[in-house]
Amino acid sequence: MSHPHPELGPPPELPAEALRIIPLGGLGEVGRNMAVLEHRGRLLIIDCGVLFPDETQPGVDLILPDFEAIRDRLGDVEAIVLTHGHEDHIGAVPYLLRERPDIPLVGSRLTLALLEAKLREHRQTRAPKYEVKEGDRQTFGPFDLEFIAVNHSIPDALAVAVRTRAGLLLHTGDFKMDQLPLDGRITDLRAFARLGAEGVDLLMVDSTNAEVPGFTTSERDIGPVLNQVFHTSRQRIIVACFASHVHRVQQVMDVAVAQGRKVAYVGRSMVRNMGVARDLGYLTVPKGVLVDMREVGNYTPEEVVIISTGSQGEPLSALARIAHRNHDRIHIEPGDTVVLASSLIPGNESSVFTVINGLTRLGANVVHKGNALVHVSGHASAGELLYCYNILTPRNVMPVHGEIRHLVANAALAVDTGVPRDRVVLAEDGVVVDLVDGEARITGKVDCGYVFVDGASVGDITESDLKDRRILGDEGFISVMVVMDSTSGKLVAGPEIHARGFVEDDKGFAEVRPLIEAALLAAVNDGNDDRYQLQQVIRRTTGRWVNQAHRRRPMIIPVVLEA
């Protein structure tokens, strides 16, 4: 297998008949999916999603792909092809359109509708949209695209086959092979077999479940479990799931209707997305079932089901606020049932269990994937991936979508089915892969870091800023202010010391004040009267004392004023 090398340089000039793949996200993490294809001087983008922050990234709202590698070539972009409507595949589109608002957008009906609602919020309306469905073919510059139906945890998902003079590339998007999907739309294995017979030169394949043996459980198996949960609950039921999981919401809606309960949505994205799905016919809501959240108080607890966002424990989500007793409308009562109908995204485990513990402490019966079959994955497990490799018999394989362990597991499956080891390319974000004369190989690397969104700020937050935030959160901070005589250099006031998240009692610093005074006197006597140098003296002296006395490393902010 071809592994990325940390000392890779910039990729060479691309031969005219070659195809270049530049992954800008989704390889090494679950989310932020984005791949750039280059052929004959033109670019095609497949997906443009976001990654949600974990607890090590305080204050960050979203993480975007790094557009820097293509920023000076946005005029060469023929289109953005979107495989489906999940946030980790469409969420960064508005941010890329800020830099070129008229890039054509290509996707299925539901995918474009969900994106359109998002673009209106960002006031991005100039991009032309091309609605496609399975079986369609579209040409954008040197890229001939064919769209194939695949089954996923959101309706209308598509794989895309890209034909160029360099060969045929198939990108699966996120997919699984549920043989009894709720909407009856299965992954088109006949199309896969046809492409296999034609000859797939490079297969870019979803890796998220590559470590899971066998086949992914069918969505239909959840129905009886939800029915049992609803049947045994005598009070209010709250179901938390992804705001785009139309299939799961439909299942909850069907059980609620069967048991005579009203349904209310909580969470702006849930209200928006389910409104879109209902308007387009992807979600069936019987008349009189859906009520506004403000009307829930008109019904008894056993007459209500609330469908909420927050299944990943996001701090500001509806469910997290409910768990922490600071939601303005919903308050948990002993005996309420909360169903977390989603899988855990890697990195979110701590946040989710915090929410589960909070709900349980309030007396709720919490049902989740760990104790009941209330969620199944939207991704192909190892058995399905093996099946696809045998149908497609690709010449080269590039695992995508997943952490490193997922990519490696997927690569091993490809080798097991007969793909030569040297034709399986293990790349990470920014590692450039070229398809030349039928062979895929790593040829270089582009800079590709995280771009953090913090409020209205995009890209202004750095890793150093996050490190400071983590220190503030974990270790606290100390500010030390002194006033020095500008003529004599003597200390005339201070040190005045304040702290947060550390020693709140001012008396706790009585020990360090004479140490700071002595260090400043020694520095001035040595001729160090520069304000910056004196600040460093304060920082070192305070830091040494804190470490020795308390075994802590807080952020220290020294301030030197002149009188």
Image (cartoon, rainbow, N blue to C red):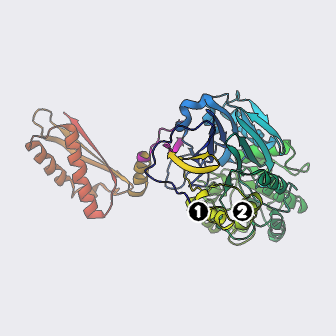
Indicate yes or no whether the magenta region holds residue 447: yes
Q: Is there a contact, CB below 8 Å, between mark 2 and mark 1?
A: no
- Numbered range of the magenta stretch: 445-464
Q: Amino acid at mark 2?
A: Leu
Q: Position of residue 370 (x, y in %)?
A: 68, 70
Q: Position of residue 402 (x, y in %)?
A: 61, 57
Q: Position of residue 181 (x, y in %)?
A: 84, 59
Q: Is residue 5 above or below residue 96?
A: below
Q: Residue furthest left?
A: 525
Q: Amino acid at mark 1?
A: Val
Q: Quadrant of the N terminus?
A: bottom right
Residue topped by disc 1 = 408
**Horizontal arrangement in the rendering, residue 560 relative to residue 412 (left or right):** left
Q: Quadrant of the C terminus?
A: top left
Indicate yes or no whether the magenta region holds residue 116: no
**Few, some or many C-alpha atoms within 10 Å of disc 2 (few <14, some 14-19, many ≥20)?**
many
**Few, some or many C-alpha atoms within 10 Å of disc 1 (few <14, some 14-19, many ≥20)?**
many
Residue topped by disc 2 = 385
> Residue at 20% across / 39% down in the picture?
483
